[in-house]
Image: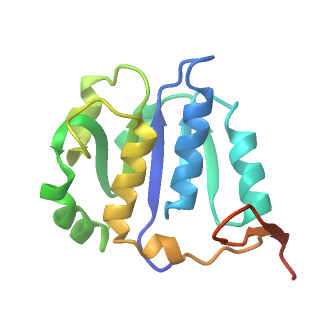
């Protein structure tokens, strides 16, 4: 979020045909809930959709595609959180992560397929939002809300062409007057 060290999501792994929507939703969830950018490993398929949504509904939010997660993790200058149902409970570590993020950029690793042990080892925190099977998109959403303590819900969007108008019933999207 603006004025804070960067929050970056690393989408690790992507099973073609199975994870395309999930990878797109990881990127869109990160965008909507306060992350600054997403790094996709070995998939261009979600990049266009995420950039299209950012172009229409505002940013800032960046999408990067890389061929391997290893250099991203190895060269990261900040703290690393790996979201996994096998990790420590988010409610037990969120204050420590929030304090660390006040000074350092944060890389949030969101897996798709079997995550290599090296990721668990490289992470400063392996975090579970629940220790039950669940969607990685749901895990990311809960984690970001905990990290930002709800402040991400009032984010200002720059360069939006459209905006959703909250309503009790129905759907309303209007062009943004510039």
Q: In this view, does 177 lie to the left or right of 6?
A: right
Most extreme residue toward the front, as rendered?
A: 169
Residue 105 point in image, percent of width and height? 38, 63
Residue 22 point in image, percent of width and height? 55, 33
Above or below: residue 140 compared with residue 162: above
Residue 89 point in image, percent of width and height? 16, 48
Q: Quadrant of residue 21?
A: top right
Q: In which quarter of the image is residue 83?
A: top left
Q: Which of 111 and 76 is in front in this view?
A: 111
Q: Which of 167 and 110 is in front in this view?
A: 167
- What residue appears at the point 59 percent right and 49 percent down from the top-left corner? 28
- What residue appears at the point 71 percent right and 58 percent down from the top-left corner? 54
- What residue appears at the point 67 percent right and 36 percent down from the top-left corner? 46
Above or below: residue 66 compared with residue 50: above
Q: Can residue 77 be seen in this view?
A: no
Q: Is residue 167 left or right of residue 1?
A: right
- What residue appears at the point 33 percent right and 58 percent down from the top-left corner? 78
Q: In this view, does 89 lie to the left or right of 140?
A: left
- Counting the numbered discs, the total is 0
Residue 138 point in image, percent of width and height? 41, 44
Q: Quadrant of residue 85?
A: top left
């Amino acid at each position: 979020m603006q004025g804070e060290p960067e929050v970056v999501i690393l989408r690790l792994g992507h099973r073609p045909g199975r994870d395309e929507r999930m990878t797109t939703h990881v990127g869109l969830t990160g965008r909507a809930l306060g992350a600054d950018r997403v790094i996709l490993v070995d998939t261009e398929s979600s990049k266009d959709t995420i950039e299209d949504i950012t172009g229409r509904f505002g940013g800032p939010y960046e999408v990067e595609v890389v061929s391997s997660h290893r250099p991203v993790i190895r060269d990261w200058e900040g703290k690393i959180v790996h979201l996994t149902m096998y990790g420590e409970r988010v409610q037990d570590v969120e204050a420590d992560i929030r304090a660390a993020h006040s000074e350092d950029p944060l890389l949030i690793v969101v897996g798709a397929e079997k995550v290599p042990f090296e990721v668990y080892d490289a992470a400063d925190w392996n975090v579970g939002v629940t220790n039950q099977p669940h969607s990685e998109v749901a895990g990311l959403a809960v984690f970001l809300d905990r990290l930002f303590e709800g402040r991400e819900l009032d984010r200002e969007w720059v360069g939006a062409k459209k905006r959703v108008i909250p309503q009790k019933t129905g759907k309303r999207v209007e062009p943004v007057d510039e």
